[in-house]
Image (tube, helix red, strand yellow):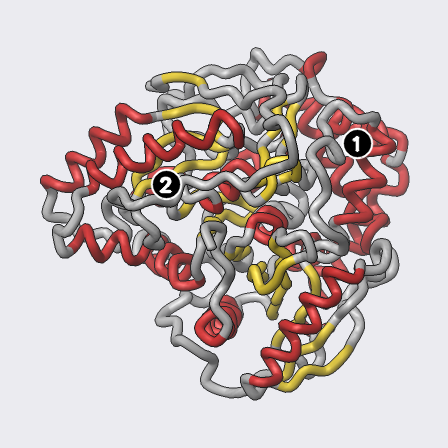
Amino acid sequence: MTDTTADAVADPTPTGPPRRVHAFRDDALGYDDASALAERVRRREVSPAELVEAAIERCAAVDPVLGALVHTDYDRARHRAEWVRNSQLSAPLAGVPSAFKDAVRVEGLPMTLGSSAVPTRPALHDGPYAPLFRATGLIPVGTTAMPPFGWTAATERQGGLVTRNPWDTGRTSGGSSGGSASLVAAGALPIAHANDGGGSIRIPAAVTGLVGFKPSRGRHPDEKFSANMPIPIISQSVVTRSVRDTVAFLTAFEAGHRPVGVPPLGTVARAPGRRLRIGLVEHSPAGDPTDAATLAVLREAADRLAALGHEIVPTTAPVPDSFREDFIAYWGLLALGTSSGGRGMFSPEFAAERLDPFTIGLAAMARRGLPSLPLHLYRLYRTRRRFDSAFGEFDVDLNPVVNHETPEVGYLDADLPYETHLERVSNWVTFTPLQNIAGSPAVSLPTGRAPDGLPIGVHLSARIGHDRLLLELASEYEQAYPFARIWE
């Protein structure tokens, strides 16, 4: 059962200028990534119990400012740590502390999807994803914050509940996996669950300096309420501080789950076996032009990839002009289904009157636009079918994750008027939704920084099922150009 509810602090902004917050220190977790910690557990240099206690202490140290945990599960984490230590099992990530995003069913914990409309009643059993996640050996210590239903790109909830960016507590941690990203970036956890329906792994990773990989559709199972979408767009994964941690998690997960419709990941090399032809996309046809700081980081990453021997060719995004309108319409359809069918999807106690303004606005837009919905769905299905061929002769596309620098807390406040919220989020998030419709893999890498020092990520994507190629390219880049660390 839940030990306690750790609600985000409504207004934890420190007095004076914004500041950086992290928990890295010389304890059991140290400065290691998840792969190094798992190796230390195997060598018995550290126990799972020591790692879990260090994670609990670190969460307690930074979460009052970051507001990233929504429910803690410390007692069960301690129990699992003792069980791992005493067992003879050798799961690849055994003993490494982690957390679930508040978007999957976990026995004994509430799943509210960041919404006041969903009751905080503990789940009676796991959903399809939670046991497979734990089978990798990871030990969840709780669940992390997200915005209502994951519709937006900042982790802010009704009533002023905010999850902050540890690089600058005055900025957003992104969304919708902003709680997980905040804790991993701050060093409270080495790795954490995240999921992605329009950029919700990649955007938080980009703004907090992490690796955020969205797998191909079919690589991981979905929760029932998302698996029944007309176009399944949700991908489950993790946010990490290294490419090798992402690879370690994906391969460990695959040991217990066979992917559907895509080839197994298999062995991921440290670099692609050949030089790649990479399409460079600087601006999205779906929004405002990319800003100067983001363009500078993107072009630097392109130059570095070229220095590694890859061919960089400027191109345009493989997306039709109607895509933004179509995706927003689909977004609205999902919100309409949530608001009208919440009692069946989540709980008989679902309270539609407590929905946030953005969900209500999206649902109302969808209701008004129902006559044109078949056209939007048809065009999205066509985009999905034609995505691979739209790549042409390119192996990978390179583009920004988002088109401008990380906004301040409040820019995507959950209590904003619907029209303001929609304009802001759709003008910032202009690159990442395409891969959710297509079902293709994509990764955000923290390759640079803005002039003020905040991380800026770049976005690599490939054809459906080409996850391994993308991870090998990401691994090669990281080895040649190590990512910045928050403690440096």
N-term mark: 2 or 1? 2
Locate residue 371: give its quadrant.
top right
Is the residue 395 above or below the residue 2 in the image?
A: below
Residue that appears at 72% across and 42% down: 407
Q: Are marks 2 and 1 in contact (CB under 8 Å)?
A: no
- Tell me: 111 left or right of 382: left
For label 2, the residue is 98
Numbered disc total: 2
Q: Can residue 43 be seen in this snapshot?
A: yes
Closer to us: 318 or 227: 318
Residue type, numbered disc 2: Ser
Residue that appears at 80% across and 34% down: 421
- Tell me: 265 left or right of 355: left
Residue that appears at 46% across and 15% down: 121
Q: Which mark is residue 362?
A: 1
Mark 2 secondary-structure assignment: strand
Is the residue 20 above or below the residue 260 in the image?
A: above
